[in-house]
Amino acid sequence: MNVNPLPQAYTYDLKQSVSNNRLLGFWRMMAGFRWRYFGAIATLGLASVFSMVSFLLIRYFVDEALQAPDLAAILPPVALGFVGLALLQGLFSFLSGKLTAQTAEGVALRLRNYMFDHIQHLTFTYHDNMKTGELIQRCTSDVDTVRRFFSEQAIGIGRIFILFSINFGALLSLHVGLALLSVIVIPPIVIMSLFFFRRVSKAWDEYEQQDAKLSTTLQENLSGVRVVKAFARQQYEQDKFEADNYEKFRRGRHFMLMHSGFWPITDVICGAQILAGYGVAAIMVMDGTLTLGAYLAYAGLLINIINPIRNLGRLIVHMSTGMVSFERVMHVIREEREPLTKGAFQPEGSLKGEVVFKDVSFGYDPEAPVLKDISFTVRPGQTVALLGSTGSGKTSVVSLLPRFYEYTGGSITIDGAELRDYPRQYLRRQIGIVEQEPFLFSRTIRENITYGVGREVSDDEVIAAAQAAAIHEVIETFPDGYNTLVGERGVTLSGGQKQRVVLARTLLKDPRILILDDATSSVDAETEDSIREALLRLMQGRTSFIIAHRIQTVMRADLILVFDKGRIIQRGTHEELMAAGGMYRHVYDLQSRIEDELEKEIASVGLPL
Ligand code: DCP
Ligand code: MG
């Protein structure tokens, strides 16, 4: 659904505005809004022309009309002239404001949409390394500073240029000497602003960095609120936050102080300029070289010309903040997107599901391999179980299949074609994953289950998936059933319930390759047994990867791989591995012993099994 009526809102690729020249970058970013931008400046110019003309009308009124014999006849049109000029000035000021708002808000709207879309397409590696709070800050606060650049500084530059030219022209027409006298302040103001520009840039950059740090602290605290409470670390977190917050205050104050040091100096210079101008002009009136009417007009025009000069200084300094934030936003935009549909090989139809790993190696950091010499073959429809201690690389192996990360050595083929030749989107549609840490959106349970199907789904299908994941009965007990909201304003699900909702979501997707990463870890043994039956049925005909810690769950797999420190140390079926001894046998014995003891204990206290 496209509710955005603005031009080129989605089609213009903001990547084109990446430039080392930030002013050029701003210019490119304005694509599609440039006519509005120039319209805003032109209407502003017209408004200034009308304002300037009213000063010239004052001169005419004082110097000529008042002396004229037929004053009574002249008065009404002159009065009408003043009213008309004021109205026109108001009208064009309004138009200019409107066009400015459309430009600035439009650019910001498109930028935010683009950033959101862009971030969704960045690689897992980028997200692993970038803090969420930092990204949020760049998408909000920095985008807002860029918006202010367009609404204030970009328009301001045009405004200053126009005000200056018009009023300077009018001044020249009044008196050339006076006009030149009125602009000698320009060089000192420009030099001073450039001097402050660099310092303010630096101060703003430091401020924004601290702002991002604070967002990160806040975001992590909100996500990790349970850990904080469980360890009773509120005071520690509070102290940490206060220290960061104080630093933000300090940097903010430094930034403001720098500004407040700049303004009074320019104000004094400009004030001196006005005084000098008024003084010289007054002397000229007394000498008789300037008429009273011209003096009055000069008095008004001088203010009109000093204001833009004074604002030029402020503007240059303010522009520095826009540029710093622009650079921070561009830093994200510069990042390459993960191509979704690109692939040397464009497959048609569904996968069969033959997966072959050959000497595969991989590391999140290329220097430190996490997987070494991984080789195995799975035929379509078979089930592979991955077993191993924590951190041994099981999740890493399965993350390679949907191309979340790229393997660095060896070869992985699916149905005979190299994995890196497949388009990512195709793979991700064909592969269903129940992740180790299940995530649900704050939407209804139904929306969560149907997420990712990409077509209309009937209630029966949803229920069937939920039943298979042994979550249907739990959902039935909720007040709104499948329409119950998850999180914040709805029900809070237990870890195991979440896992089963995610399982239902994956089953509904009907993937050709199914990956269950510890999908039953938060489920008690009894529920696991009931899910297992359903899963076994569902795994029929699909290539499945199961990661689990209980041997019960994996023993029926066609191939069991035992991992240790990124290598496969044992492989085979349950029977083969039992006969071979080693790690697998050891874990099996350990688990059976624990279960036996548990049973005995339960029997001894007389609880029914
Ligand atoms: N690792 C990493 N960066 C990531 C994910 C993991 O550097 N984004 C590291 C941590 C481990 C190694 O890779 O040292 C293997 O991690 P896995 O997640 O593959 O380990 P397992 O899935 O086997 O462990 P667990 O049973 O705890 O899930
Ligand atoms: Mg894991």
Image (cartoon, rainbow, N blue to C red):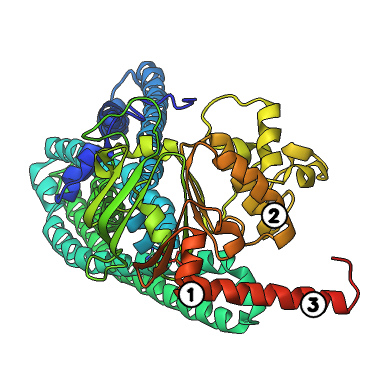
Which amino acid is tagged 1? Asn
> For the residue labelled by badge 1, is the local secondary structure a helix, a strand or a loop?
helix
Report the disc number at residue 245.
Answer: 1
Q: Position of residue 107 (x, y in %)?
A: 35, 37
Dot 1 or dot 3, earlier in sequence = 1
Categorize mark 1 by other alpha carbons within 10 Å: few (<14), some (14-19), many (20+).
some
Q: CA distance from mark 3 to mark 2?
A: 20 Å
Labels 1 and 2 touching (C-beta < 8 A): no
Q: Nearer the viewer, residue 126 or 566?
A: 566
Report the disc number at residue 600.
Answer: 3
Count of marks overlaid on the render: 3
Residue at 61% in and 69% down: 225
Dot 1 or dot 2, earlier in sequence = 1
Labels 3 and 2 touching (C-beta < 8 A): no
Residue at 71% in and 44% down: 485
Residue position marked by numbered label 2 in the rendering: 529
For label 1, being within 8 Å of ligand 1 is answered no
Q: Nearer the viewer, residue 440 or 570?
A: 570
Q: Position of residue 351 (x, y in %)?
A: 39, 33
